[in-house]
Image (spheres, helix red, strand yellow):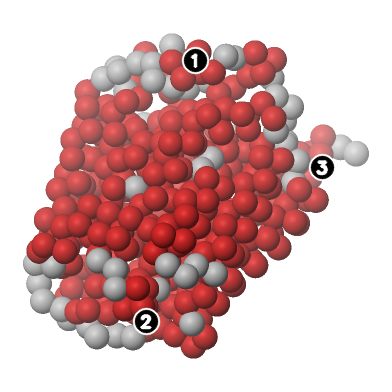
Amino acid sequence: MSLSATNRDYDRYAWVIFALTFGLLISDYMSRQVLNAVFPLLKAEWALTDAQLGSLSGIVALMVGLLTVPLSFLADRWGRVKSLTLMAVLWSLATLLCAYSQSFAQMFAGRFMVGIGEAAYGSVGIALVLSAFPERLRATLSAAFMAGGMMGSVLGLGLGGVLANALGWRYAFGAMALFGLVLALIYPLLVRDPRPHSDIEAATPMMVALKTVWRGAQLPWVYLGSGLQLFVSASLMAWLPSLLNREYHWDTATAGLAAGGFVFIGGIGMIVSGYFADRIRQQGCYRAEQIAMVYCGCSAIALLIAFSVPAGVLQLVSLAIAMCFCAATTGPAGALVAALTPAAIHGTAFAMLTLMNNLLGLAPGPFLTGLLADSLGLSLALMVLLPLMSLFSALAFWHVACKSYDNAVAR
């Protein structure tokens, strides 16, 4: 067989890895976001406050944040494919348990277990994907892969809302669990680690790896900027169905489908923004952190307009534009982390990025928004918090731009 034929086979297999790992990420977020589609039903059935509803969403992200670093470090050594399969089985079974919850406490426990199962999937999954592709595609692949979270959210919100409206919210959780279990059974049959672990990776102690992923003046600001911008994304995904239900008086199915449509726009925005970030960087005009600053600014402006106008067409269009940019920093942030850390510990490096994304954004976003909504109302809470977080994120990426990037990459 010729060398070119061998390379073509490898390229095809790399896309198999991407497709199946992307599919499991979709399952991950379907299990995570189906809850938000049924917020109105749970609020009515169990008489819950917005803060309690937000805590059911936030506990998953909190557990992901707390456990992602140690579990990702172990996955780098035990085997990424085996680890990803085990995670998928765990979060799917935990989602099935949520379907049988009879109270807020039981649902909270089920969501707690979902968070444990999903803890390291994003970081280990992206490390596995990036190891199968050339360096020049990092921002594109980082954004495209993480867009699986948006696509999973679309299905979780849209399909979950439809199933809950037709059959009850328990069936919505059950459907998400079944999808994840089927993919988890297929995954290890078709995917293997594309490269053996290097001797350096196997020998790197955990404390050395953790010091490395915090080393330099740039990395902490990258983590901060990424986490603060995902505060915006998480809050929108959690509360859009409720906003549409309360402000537009749409039923659960309609609000869930519409929210899924907005999140789909966000997923497309992630992929397109990552692609343009790679193209612009390759031309040598701007660096990833400068591109991220622009994305944050666009997000803040669109959000201010969306929540400053009454319910109607202008608000919906502004929300769609905001969704295009609210997670657009994912690609540039992933490219920065990959460039500033050794390849041998990319799993741990992306785990640290995931940790900060969750502790600064995905976990507190839905809860703090819900807490403020109990006092101010949902629309005003969104208007106060979200544009401010986008501006803080832009400031963090500005700090990255002020540092010596080239020297950091060389080091």
Vertical arrangement, residue 384 with respect to residue 352, above or below:
below
Lower sequence index among marks 2 and 1: 1
Secondary element at tag 1: helix
Task: Identify which amino acid the numbered label 2 is placed on.
Answer: Thr
Q: Which residue is mark 3?
A: 5
Residue placed most toward the observer, 165 or 234:
165
Q: CA distance from mark 3 to mark 2?
A: 51 Å
Q: Which residue is mark 1?
A: 207
Q: Judge the density around disc 2: few (<14), some (14-19), many (≥20) Cα neighbours within 10 Å.
A: many
Secondary element at tag 2: helix
Lower sequence index among marks 3 and 2: 3
Give the percent coordinates (x, y) of residue 333.
38, 37
Q: Quadrant of the N terminus?
A: top right
**Which of label 1 and label 3 is nearer to you?**
1
Give the percent coordinates (x, y) of residue 275.
44, 48
Q: Which residue is mark 2?
A: 252
Judge whether residue 274 can be spotted in this image.
no
